[in-house]
Image (cartoon, rainbow, N blue to C red):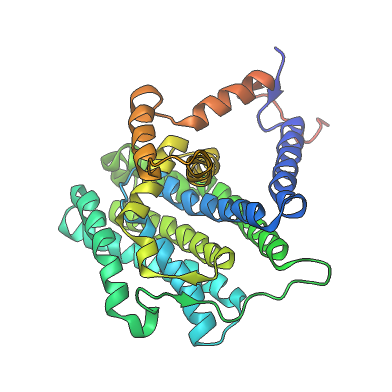
Amino acid sequence: MFGVERGSAAWRVLVAVGAVVAVVAVTAPAFVLDPIPARLFTRFVALAVVLLGLQFVVGASGQLSLCHGVFVAVGSYTAAITNTTWGWPIWAGLLLSPVTAFVAGSLVGVLALRIRATYLGPVTLGVAVAFPMLLKRFSWLTGGATGLPLLREMDPPAGLALHQWNHVVSVAVASVAFVLMRNLQQSAIGLSVRAVAENAFSASTSGVDVRATRVRAFGTGAAFGGLGGALLVIDTPIVGADAYDLFRSLGYYAAAVVGGVGSMVGAVLGGLLLIGVPWVLDSLGSRVGPNLVFGGLLVLSVALSPGGLAVAVQRIVRWVIPVRDAVPGRPTDSADPPT
């Protein structure tokens, strides 16, 4: 049968080549486009990381999160506060933002579980509504509605403009994030998360701590959202409370579902939607708001293609490059030769 066998040497080469081509394709716009359109691609990279966390929470762990924008904001404010208030370099904010977002996500997950697991959706919705008010209440730290700017942007190497260097850094961080997510989903932790999502009772009888697994999964998704939020600050060096209202969280959720939950490809497609839809509407001079379009796309996706756009893209790729699963018991290309 024609095709590439999953897990074979040819399969690994194909995946490696595809990854390199994808990184080059995403990096190139910063060097061939003017600064303003190039920055759209930088924002797309950051949003792909944001949705990477949401697809893990909603897709892999089967939990509903309507406050993902809160964790993105936590990451953004972590980067801005450490840079502007504490004088730390932006690199420090990038490293710390997933940690603070993980803590915030874990707290929300614990709160919802202590009330009742089925109330996770309403709890996250309430958090999304209340969070902008908290940001304005603690304006001495967050800058309130005025916002908090970055005072120390990254210094680009010789020969690179600032927007080019910001883009290169964003692509590098996003590449690491996608590799980490792929490894996480294939690890024992990822398998336990999926087991709990599929059948919590069976998972518990196998020795899996269901409550702890759900909280860790929620916190992990929030951590990726926080990292994406820090990358957004690199692109737009100011963060304000009004930028992270309820509709921002709902927009993230809609983009994740339309792109395809539970799929890293879906995170990329969702990021393209978050950038592409407002750009198209603005180019056409339309008075229709992006939120209305996202709402319509969400309804259509649920009705016509529950797997999102990722399913269609994967079908096209498999039609172009047929991939077949490895036959059990058959030695792979990497197996030791018989002696």
Q: Quadrant of residue 150?
A: bottom right
Is residue 93 in view from this perspective? yes
For the C terminus, give its image quadrant.
Answer: top right
- Identity of the residue drawn at 77% across and 36% down: 13
Above or below: residue 327 compared with residue 142 = above
Looking at the picture, how far across and down is residue 177, in whole percent?
Answer: 58, 55
Above or below: residue 222 compared with residue 11 = below
Position of 198 with respect to 85 (left or right) is left
Q: Along the line of sight, which residue is nearer the eye, 19 or 117?
A: 19
Residue located farthest toward the left when viewing the structure as drawn: 115
Position of 227 with respect to 162 (left or right) is left
Q: Along the line of sight, which residue is nearer the eye, 83 or 110?
A: 83
Position of 33 with respect to 244 (left or right) is right
For the N terminus, give its image quadrant.
Answer: top right
Looking at the picture, how far across and down is residue 10, in whole percent?
Answer: 76, 31
Looking at the picture, how far across and down is residue 135, in whole percent?
Answer: 32, 73
